[in-house]
Image (cartoon, rainbow, N blue to C red):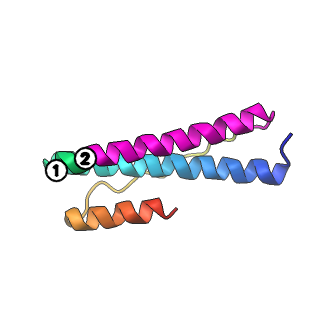
Amino acid sequence: MLSKKMETALNKQINQELFSAYQYMGLAAYFAEKNLNGFAHWMRMQAQEELAHSGKLFNYVVDRNGKIDLQAIKAPAKTWKDALAALQAAYKACLL
């Protein structure tokens, strides 16, 4: 069984992982629109990795009879000044 403090922290981390995935998908869309398909593909792969992290944490909480508390996910940015600014946003997202 999880302590309430641990359960809260894990639910917060699940939300952060899902936000990161959402941010990477926003970046993938931006790069696809700019016909930078390699970057778009790489961002989709990063999003899948974040979803895998959230899934593992989700299962960990459930397996220990914890309560999942999914919260709203903030919308990602949709446009950037240029590809460099988009990549800098990707770097910032991975620091969450």
Give the secondary structure at mark 1. loop
Instruction: Tell me if label 2 and label 1 are in contact, CB under 8 Å.
Output: yes
Q: Is residue 7 magenta?
A: no
Residue at image x 78%, y 52%?
A: 6
Taking the view exactly as shown, the residue that stands out farthest to the left is: 35
Residue nearer the viewer, 73 or 87 = 87
Mark 2 Cα-neighbour bin, 10 Å: few <14, some 14–19, many ≥20: many
Magenta region, mostly helix, strand or loop?
A: helix
Residue type at numbered disc 2: Ala
Looking at the picture, how far across and down is residue 23, in whole percent? 40, 52
- The answer to whether residue 91 is visible is yes
Residue that carries the numbered disc 1 in the rendered image: 36
Residue at image x 81%, y 33%?
A: 65
Residue nearer the viewer, 95 or 33 = 95
Residue at image x 83%, y 44%?
A: 2
Mark 1 Cα-neighbour bin, 10 Å: few <14, some 14–19, many ≥20: some
- With 84 as the anchor, is 20 left or right in this view? right
Residue nearer the viewer, 74 or 54 = 54
Residue type at numbered disc 1: Leu
- With 2 as the anchor, is 61 left or right in this view? left
Give the secondary structure at mark 2. helix
Q: If the image is split into quadrants, where does the N terminus sit? A: top right
> So how many labels did they put on this image?
2
Looking at the picture, how far across and down is residue 90, in whole percent? 36, 60
Mark identifier at residue 80? none
Query: How far apart are the two marked residues, 2 and 1, measured between alpha carbons?
Result: 6 Å
Point out the stretch of residues depicted in magenta.
40-67
Looking at the picture, how far across and down is residue 55, in whole percent? 58, 37
Q: Is residue 57 magenta?
A: yes
Residue that carries the numbered disc 2 in the rendered image: 40
Looking at the picture, how far across and down is residue 42, in whole percent? 30, 47
